[in-house]
Amino acid sequence: MCGIVGYIGQKKAYPILIKGLKRLEYRGYDSAGVAMIDTKGGLNVYKAKGKVADLEAFCEDKDISGNAGIAHTRWATHGEPNSANAHPHYSASGRLALIHNGIIENYATIKENLVARGIQFKSVTDTEVLVQLIEHIMVSNDLDLLEAVQVALHQVIGAYAIAILDREHPDTIICARQSSPLVVGLGEDGDFYLASDASPIAEYTDKVVYLNDGDIAVMRLGEKLKVVNLDNETQHPKVKQIDVTLGQLEKGGYPFFMLKEIFEQPNCLRDCMRGRINVEGDRITLSAVIDFREKLAGARRIIIVACGTSWHAGLIGKQLFESLCRIPVEVEYASEFRYREPVIFPDDVVIAISQSGETADTLAAIELARQAGAFVFGVCNAIGASIPRQTQTGVYIHVGPEIGVASTKAFTGQVTVLSMLALCLANERRTIPGDVYKEMVAELTRIPEKMEEALKTNEQIERLAPIFTYAKNCLYLGRGYNYPVALEGALKLKEISYIHAEGYPAAEMKHGPIALIDSEMPVFVIATRDKLYEKVISNIQEVRARGGRVTALVTAGDEQIRRLADHVIELPDTLECFQPLIASIPLQLLAYHIAVCKGKDVDRPRNLAKSVTVE
Ligand code: M6R
């Protein structure tokens, strides 16, 4: 939530900052702002409600000169989205400007003290409290900015990634992180870049430093990057090679990132399996399983912690681990798990799933599991993010940056990694016969091709979508492996089209939701041929009998359901456990086209942000 960008060097700062904000806009987009030291040494802050484009329009007649600046795109936590609450925030004297991603939990107490000392506030944000506190400490104790930041951050409880500009020291940006991501880019000419993730930095340098919790970085022109902690002890973070390409950050001719990312899935899954499944396509090797074989294969229980779409992937993982490995699995919302005093055993394996690797609740769940002595395994997409760094081992899904707020390729990447892990462990534990293992691995390698087949439904779905734009409510039904697909389909529709949608296990419908069904209620049923096929047909009959309008996802050639449903979408056949990888595609496309028909901003749905770094 909230995106941070900074630059200091020989180039003009403004274009770098604006471009960087656009790359980070997925993190928040209710207001944006920029602070720059101009060529005359003034510290200018410009802010606007709305998207980065609104900020750009606002800056058209402003002084945007200068080679040092910080910028921010906001996802509101404290105070409504308006220009007063937008970042950067000035200190009382106007000497400092600060941007922040995170939440200062004890801001109210700090603010009370500052107000008592006569400091006035222009916004209702927790962030302004921090910049006022830093300046107050600096002035009243005659400290330099770094010292004041260290003292201030000792007083702060909460999560932050911050960056500060000081008018008196225009050659320096200071930034710090605690529980919110921050990456520093090291340019060729000694210039410095700063961002919430590597995407705004990628086109300027491939050398980055991922800051750790408690780090404070001083970027001063003409000097090497200096990193210290709150007690001024020097830190030695590693310089890493950046992992994203520019092509991955552009829309590549698609109108929205979401559509691009839906269509990328076959290749993403190939990337995800590359080097892990041998060329013969009959063996999976995961280095995490080699390194921690006993821990993983000997797990007494698996607990999966995740949020949102990643939690849905976890529900599929549960069925995979239970049926293939015969290990009991619990799937927990990280936000509930962290506060529930759960029973955790030292021989439990906790699997944390997260696209961004920065989700605050999932990070807290990991911490809790580690304290209880469990072994923690991460399934993550963003390289170098906090979750892979705080887990003992794990597997990257390698699907490339996901920019659309609605998760698509990350979901199928997560399910693919969980499938590989379950097969690997089942093979280690000998819970499935060798020939079954080989056949399943071979089928997994065929999934990208089958996804390409499933993507051919795009035109049909585009034609169907306008029929559903009137809907106020939709029901998604599925059973077994397709139940999480129903949940995920409903979530996709909700978040980008703002149509209320519920996912339900098809057989549960008669225990309540059936009361909602009438001719106004579109019902999407995942009814591919598997062991529960006949039972799902009965569920379709129950919907039809109440006037419900059924759109069914079926296995290619299914004539029986064609006679029952209003619309059918045909999908290639695969093993039941891999069906979610195929069946989720038409549901992603459906949500996408309905949202487009309704004129919604698909990549930046209201109230949402890509990376939920607050609890
Ligand atoms: O980055 P994470 O996978 O940890 O994010 C978890 C959820 O916030 C995320 O999946 C969210 O539900 C998506 N917007 C759904 O499309």
Image: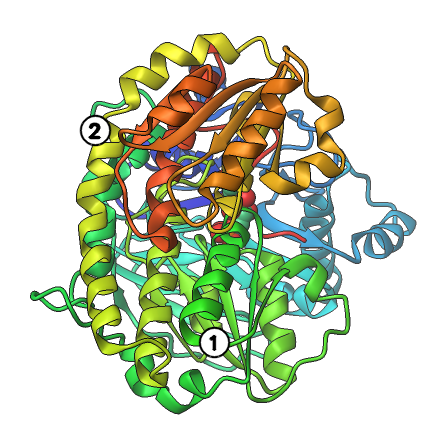
**Residue 207 vs residue 359: left or right?**
left
Is residue 314 depicted above or below 431 in this figure?
above
Furthest-right residue in view?
Answer: 116
Q: Label 2 crowding class (10 Å Cα cut-off): few <14, some 14-19, many 20+?
A: few
Q: Nearer the viewer, residue 209 or 555?
A: 555
| Residue drawn at 72 percent across, 49 percent down | 132
The percent position of residue 441, horizontal first and vertical second, equals: 22, 64
Nearest to the eye among marks 1 and 2: give it.
Answer: 1
> Based on the displayed image, in which of its 4 quarters is residue 271 positioned?
bottom left
Q: Mark 2 belongs to which amino acid?
A: Gly
**Residue 336 vs residue 95: left or right?**
right
Q: Nearer the viewer, residue 255 or 179?
A: 255
| Residue drawn at 42 percent across, 26 percent down | 561
Q: Mark 1 belongs to which amino acid?
A: Arg
| Residue drawn at 44 percent across, 26 percent down | 552
Query: Closer to the N terminus: mark 1 or mark 2?
Result: 2
Q: Label 1 crowding class (10 Å Cα cut-off): few <14, some 14-19, many 20+?
A: some
Q: Is mark 2 within 8 Å of ligand 1?
A: no
Q: Which residue is mark 1?
A: 326
- Image mark for residue 529: none
**Residue 461 vs residue 11: left or right?**
right
Q: Is residue 145 visible?
A: no
The percent position of residue 155, horizontal first and vertical second, equals: 74, 67
> Based on the displayed image, in which of its 4 quarters is residue 515 positioned?
top right
